Amino acid sequence: MNHGSITYGKQYIPFNILYVDRKTLEIAVLPDTSVVIKAPISTRHEEIEKRVAKRARWICRQIAFFNQFNPKTPPRQYLSGETHLYLGRRYRLKLKSGNADGIKLTRGHFLVTSQQRNSPGHIKGMLDNWYADRARHKLHESYERCWQSIHQHAHSRPSLNIRRMKTRWGSLSKNGILTLNVELIRAPQDCIDYVITHELCHLIHHDHGPGFYKLLEKVMPDWERRKHRLELSLI
Ligand SMILES: [Zn+2]
């Protein structure tokens, strides 16, 4: 791997360069705050430095973003003040005692009412159910939307299955079942659409060959931006 660096204000930004067979230059900041440049094979070093300098403000912002989670986000404790994600937005948990269990989303807050407000296990159960319920709703909506843009290319419409998945956002089985990770409900809407569209493109192209990307590009021209946003938003 090749290396380079620039300075932006007082910040020294080292980066690694991967020369790849592609047309455009791509800059990524990884969760460990390292900066990786994927550049077309013939790109000159000065050109890469120039491009990195141009994006320096954004790079510094990404580094700062990841730094707030280092070494690691503490595990959720289900106490007031903690933040939880829903459709890409952060909501602060506010626990209130009351006779009936209930969850309301209001102005940046998850307002959770329960007699057992001091039991983190109970609050977790309530939130898990709430997320699962919203996921059923929102992921179906999203599926309908994405299906509209791809159905003319596909032969048959897969059925939708939503469940917890350990390592993936979604998958498409050979017998036509689209499985989505219930945790996707924490991601921004346009990222959810990206995951679904990606999987639906596998109806036509089973691998990640050039044909697959050509189709993905056609039905969702800004898929790469959405993919990056997804990678950044759920840390
Ligand atoms: Zn895929």
Image: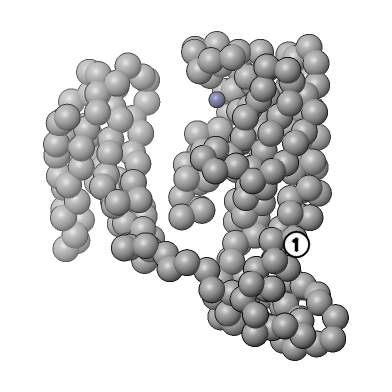
Split into quadrants, the picture shows ligand 1 in the one at top right
- In front here: 214 or 161? 161
- Snapshot quadrant of residue 83: bottom right
- Snapshot quadrant of residue 130: bottom right
Helix, strand, or loop for circle 1? Answer: helix
Q: Tell me if residue 190 comes above or below residue 83 in the rendering.
A: above
- In front here: 185 or 148? 185
Q: Which residue is drawn at 71% across and 58% down?
A: 131
Q: Where is residue 8 in the image (x, y as percent from the top left)?
A: 20, 56
Q: In which quarter of the image is the N terminus?
A: top left
Q: Which colour scheme is used?
A: one colour
Q: What's the residue type where badge 1 is placed?
A: Trp
Q: Position of residue 161 (x, y in %)?
A: 75, 36
Q: Tell me if residue 5 comes above or below residue 97 in the rendering.
A: above
Q: Position of residue 226 (x, y in %)?
A: 54, 40
Q: Which residue is drawn at 75% across and 60% down?
A: 129
Q: Which residue is drawn at 17% across and 47% down?
A: 14
Q: 202 left or right of 30?
A: right
- In front here: 24 or 216? 216
Q: Tell me if residue 102 comes above or below residue 235 in the rendering.
A: below
Which residue is under mark 1?
130
